[in-house]
Amino acid sequence: MASLRELGLRDSPGEVILSTLNPDSSPHAAAVGVRARGEEEVEMLLFHPSVSLSNLRREGEGVLNVTDDVSLLVRVGLRNLLPPPRLEFLPSALLRTPRLGGMRGYAYLRVREVEEREVEDELGTSTASRVLCRAVGVEVVSPGVKPFLRSEFFLLEAAVKASRILVARERGMKVRRMVEELRRLVEECLRLAPSSGEAETARELLEAVERRVGMW
């Protein structure tokens, strides 16, 4: 079996797409942060409510789909803001849960432990679950890793900021400062790669957030 490190997973958080099975056996995909714990385990922190968490609890399994396409990650993670991407679900050899086509690699997971906890941050108190899984199989499709572009970094950070703006808005918090921070991240992405796919996604993201929160 290939190693989690060959997939690029480390003990610092990395963004991947997690596929799980819904109660009706239809596939579900979500962008999640994950970190490796040793050679065979991975850990996720999933905030409530979470379809992925419910599916992991019920089915006891999931697939990490590793991609270096940052725009795809953002569109999967923010489908309530951006047009959803077309995803091709393919059968997995080791699990019932399908994998996604076109990925750089996969980790097939069995859930070992789910622990609920309270998380304190600038948005207040949130409930989350730490999910520890064992990798029963790792598949590396494309071993070569391309350089990580700065424009991709700013797009990913913009997506995280956008998701936090939506949570803050739902909680009745002021979001003016957060929207300004989002705008700066998007502007930097546009400056670095104005004609790229990342720039197009960043523009769409900012426009969608401004529409949702009424500019502020």
Image (cartoon, rainbow, N blue to C red):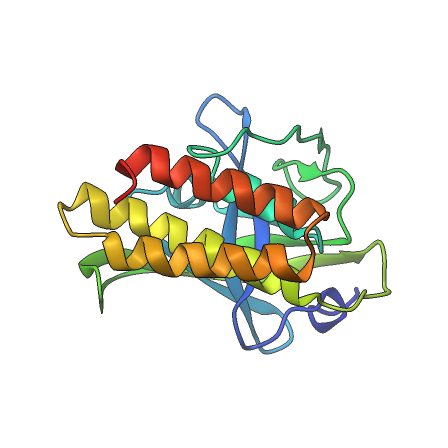
Residue at the top extreme, as displayed: 24
- 55 vs 6, left or right, is left
The image shows residue 66 at horizontal and vertical percentages of 68, 54
Q: Residue at x 59, y 78 (%)?
A: 38
Pick the quarter of the image with the C terminus.
top left
Q: Is residue 50 visible?
A: yes
Q: Residue at x 17, y 52 (%)?
A: 174
Examine the image and state in which quarter residue 209 appears.
top left
Against 89, is 134 above or below?
below
Q: Is residue 18 visible?
A: no
The image shows residue 214 at horizontal and vertical percentages of 27, 35
Identify which residue, 106 or 147, lies in the foreground. Answer: 147
- 17 vs 91, left or right, is left
The image shows residue 11 at horizontal and vertical percentages of 55, 77
Examine the image and state in which quarter residue 124 appears.
bottom left
Against 37, is 127 above or below?
above
